[in-house]
Amino acid sequence: MTDKQILDEVYYNLRDMNQAHINTVEGQERLKDKIKATLDFVETEWQKNDEEEQRNEYNRNRPFSEHK
């Protein structure tokens, strides 16, 4: 995903959280679940980015035929 797509996803998740009904136990649980899902999403995207950077660093000084 691009940075813009990631920011869009986080924005919409935060917007939904802001509109959550947190005055009920059910609303609080939904909010907690949405926060966890958003954190997991961001961490997954960061990990993908880190892996891509590592792959690029590894490939930088190798012949193209050896690229992973």
Image (cartoon, rainbow, N blue to C red):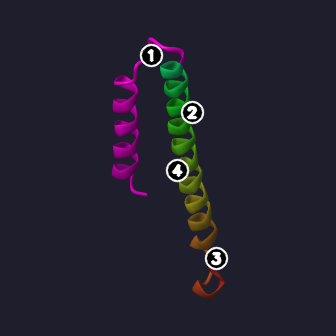
Magenta residues, start to end: 1-25
Residue closer to the observer: 43 or 60: 43
Nearer mark to the viewer, of 1 and 2: 1
Q: Kindly state the secondary structure of the residue where label 3 is placed.
A: loop
Q: Are circles 1 and 3 on residues that touch, CB within 8 Å?
A: no
For marks 3 and 2 on the same chain, the one whose residue lies earlier in the sequence: 2
Instruction: Report the label total.
Output: 4
Name the kind of residue labelled 2 in the image: Lys
Disc sitting over residue 22 in the figure: 1
Q: Are circles 2 and 4 on residues that touch, CB within 8 Å?
A: no
Q: Kindly state the secondary structure of the residue where label 1 is placed.
A: loop
The residue that disc 4 covers is 45
Characterize the magenta stretch by its predominant secondary structure: helix
Name the kind of residue labelled 1 in the image: Ile
Name the kind of residue labelled 4 in the image: Glu
Q: Is 66 on the left-hand or right-hand side of 40?
A: right
How many C-alpha atoms fall within 10 Å of the one at disc 2: few (<14), some, or many (≥20)?
few
For marks 3 and 4 on the same chain, the one whose residue lies earlier in the sequence: 4
Nearer mark to the viewer, of 4 and 1: 1
Q: Report the residue at 56% width, 62% height from top.
A: 52
Q: Kindly state the secondary structure of the residue where label 2 is placed.
A: helix
Task: Work out whether 20 lies above or below 37.
Answer: above
